[in-house]
Amino acid sequence: MARSKSPTLTDAELRLMRVLWRRGPSTVAEVTDALKGDDKVAYSTVQTTMRILEEKGYLTHHKEGRAFVYSAQVGAGQARQSALRYVLDRFFNNSPELLLMNVIESEEIDLENAEQIRDLLRASGLDEEVSS
């Protein structure tokens, strides 16, 4: 049975997107070369994955000479937001509160991070709603 396409980025897709976010527009060969420091990835695998990313709307391409040059259509921040929405919907019944409580209860948060969270709540005005 074939797996359904992931609405978010798979690990392999994320590795390729990170290359494109870092390098900017790139050919399949350039992305393959950039991944050589990681596990060895075949040119054809990179090519197929980039086509899938284009079908998902993450990439677009144009032709330069004989090569296709791929460009990211979705930034890293947008990809994070999409993944977060997916996790919220799938595991937390669209409840940011439930997600945040789960993170706080299951992760060790140091004082600096706790202060950053408090500052974000203050800046958004949410801390006033909570303390009222």
Image (tube, rainbow, N blue to C red):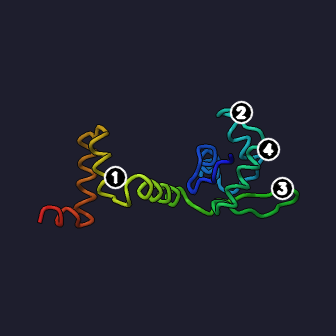
Instruction: Give the labeled residue for mark 2.
Output: 40
- Amino acid type at circle 1 is Leu
Q: Say whether disc 4 or disc 1 marks the residue closer to the N-terminus.
A: 4
Look at 34% across and 52% down and name the residue there. Answer: 99
Instruction: Give the labeled residue for mark 4.
Output: 44
Q: Say whether disc 1 or disc 2 marks the residue closer to the N-terminus.
A: 2
120 vs 76, left or right, is left
Instruction: Give the labeled residue for mark 3.
Output: 67
Instruction: Give the labeled residue for mark 1.
Output: 99
SS for dot 4: helix
Residue 130 percent location from the top left of the image: 17, 62
- Amino acid type at circle 3 is Ala
- Labels 4 & 3 near each other (Cβ < 8 A): no
Look at 77% across and 38% down and name the residue there. Answer: 42
Q: Quadrant of residue 39?
A: top right
Spatial CA span between label 1 and label 3: 44 Å
SS for dot 2: loop
Spatial CA span between label 4 and label 2: 12 Å
- Labels 4 & 2 near each other (Cβ < 8 A): no
